[in-house]
């Protein structure tokens, strides 16, 4: 029978050894489990509650559990420092081999940086943006801490095979990143639930032109449109990226001809304007020209959606010979130490700082109310993940989502503006 990527992935991992179709339930073998700052709870608190007086008695595979202290490194409070200390003790006691402790950065980016996730694998993580690993042809999804507790013990988990939606992207990749505009455009046109409980399969003539950075943005944002998985097929770019980081073998996924899809969506990016999501919903999307003139207090680039090299490079390119507008706080957070180092070696950080931007420690803080809080009545435009009320502190602040060009243009102008009006090189 012809299968989608999700059906093929879960058929391969089905403990019953049988092929499955959309809607089927199964117990699946897990290839890898990503734990971040929530690791302490399933490793210790939930284990004690379940009757293991000393915490988890063991883990299913010490080499397939990846613990990365992303949200709270460095620790911003005594409470967080104490929670980190618990995780360190548990990791050592359980003999977990992969532990990134004192390295700041976002776990999802670090999973790719270090080749910890590979094409064709089924990977789970206790964070909703785990879907981002679909950028390298992995079936990856976020799970609850209770589910992670079970995975840590047994390396298995139940799934219902999702139906799939095919998103066909056509057009030409310009000399700047457009992934954020793509996913916002899709959410605006089809609703921010167009992939609810489904697997997204990206295809089309644009896809081979997309960098892994851009694919990571699209896969990561799968959760913002309700998806269970958000996957790209493996191509030359995928193999080059993965093989530069790991020598472990893998078996890529590809859909069969004639596979059945719940829906097919097509988007020609040549006809797509720059867009923003207005407060307070991911799908509240309009062309940027309809939000022109909104004064901003803060602009941000970062997160697991847009904290990679191409996002920071375009900001530095746009700021060359310009300054951040007076009164605007332009905060840039690389997604990981490796991304930060890449930007340093390319001379981007110097250009950003000279132009008046603030470059902060890699991590998740820029996306949440941990760094760069907003006060009542303030407005922020951000290339991070979410714009709901309170995401940056005050529930009386407004958050707009946009791509890195739109964010940088606003930082220069002091208000939301079409990037083409600021950067004539487009």
Image (tube, rainbow, N blue to C red):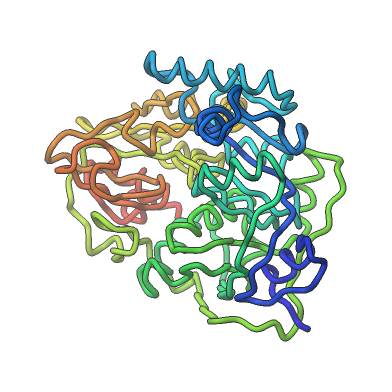
Q: Nearer the viewer, residue 243 or 419?
A: 243
Residue 250 horizontal side relative to residue 136, left or right: right
Q: Nearer the viewer, residue 201 or 341?
A: 201
User: Is 329 placed above or below 169 here?
Assistant: above
Residue 220 image position (x, y, % from top left): 52, 52
Residue 250 horizontal side relative to residue 167, left or right: right
The image quarter in which residue 180 lies: bottom left
Residue 72 image position (x, y, % from top left): 46, 25
- One can see residue 141 in this view: yes
- At x 60% / y 29%, what residue is drawn? 52
Quadrant where the N terminus lies?
A: bottom right
Residue 15 horizontal side relative to residue 272, left or right: right
Quadrant where the C terminus lies?
A: bottom left
Residue 283 horizontal side relative to residue 7, left or right: left
- One can see residue 347 in this view: no
Q: How many marks?
A: 0
Q: Residue furthest front?
A: 51
The image quarter in which residue 119 lies: bottom right
Residue 58 image position (x, y, % from top left): 71, 30
- At x 29% / y 45%, what residue is drawn? 381
- At x 56% / y 72%, what residue is drawn? 169
The image quarter in which residue 140 lies: bottom right
- At x 71% / y 28%, what residue is drawn? 98
User: Is 409 placed above or below 57 here?
Assistant: below
Q: Residue furthest bottom?
A: 258
């Amino acid at each position: 029978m012809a299968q989608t990527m999700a059906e093929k992935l879960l058929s391969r991992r089905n403990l019953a050894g049988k092929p499955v179709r959309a809607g089927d339930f199964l117990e699946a073998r897990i290839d890898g489990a990503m734990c971040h700052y929530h690791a302490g709870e399933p490793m210790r608190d939930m284990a004690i509650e379940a009757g293991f007086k000393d915490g988890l008695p063991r883990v299913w595979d010490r080499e397939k559990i990846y613990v990365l202290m992303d949200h709270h490194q460095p620790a911003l409070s005594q409470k967080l420092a104490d929670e980190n200390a618990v995780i360190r003790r548990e990791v050592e006691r359980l003999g977990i081999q992969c532990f990134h402790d004192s390295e700041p950065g976002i776990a999802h980016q670090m999973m790719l940086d270090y080749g910890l996730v590979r094409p064709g694998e089924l990977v789970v993580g206790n964070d909703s943006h785990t879907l981002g690993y679909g950028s390298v042809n992995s079936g990856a999804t976020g799970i609850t801490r209770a589910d992670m507790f079970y995975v840590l013990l047994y390396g298995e988990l139940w799934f219902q095979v999702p139906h799939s939606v095919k998103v066909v992207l056509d057009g030409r990749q310009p000399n700047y990143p457009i992934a954020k505009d793509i996913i916002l455009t899709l959410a605006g046109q089809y609703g921010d639930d167009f992939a609810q409980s489904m697997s997204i399969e990206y295809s089309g003539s644009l896809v081979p032109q997309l960098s892994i950075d851009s694919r990571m943005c699209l896969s990561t944002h799968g959760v913002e449109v309700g998806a269970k998985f958000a996957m790209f097929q493996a191509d030359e770019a995928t193999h080059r990226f993965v093989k530069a980081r790991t020598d472990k073998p893998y078996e890529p996924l590809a859909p069969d001809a004639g596979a059945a899809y719940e829906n097919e969506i097509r988007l020609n990016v040549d006809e797509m304007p720059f867009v923003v999501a207005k407060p307070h919903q991911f799908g509240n999307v309009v062309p940027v020209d309809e939000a022109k003139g909104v004064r901003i207090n803060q602009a941000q680039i970062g997160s697991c959606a847009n904290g990679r090299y191409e996002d920071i490079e375009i900001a530095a390119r746009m700021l060359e010979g310009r300054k951040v507008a007076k009164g605007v706080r332009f905060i840039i957070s690389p997604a990981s130490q490796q991304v930060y180092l890449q930007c340093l070696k390319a001379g981007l950080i110097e250009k950003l700082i000279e132009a008046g931007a603030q470059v902060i420690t890699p991590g998740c803080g820029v996306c949440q109310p941990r760094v760069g809080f907003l006060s009542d009545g303030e407005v922020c435009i951000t290339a991070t993940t979410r714009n709901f009320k309170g995401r940056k502190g005050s529930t009386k602040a407004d958050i707009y989502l946009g791509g890195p060009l739109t964010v940088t243009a606003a930082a220069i102008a002091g208000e939301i503006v079409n990037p083409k009006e600021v950067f004539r090189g487009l």
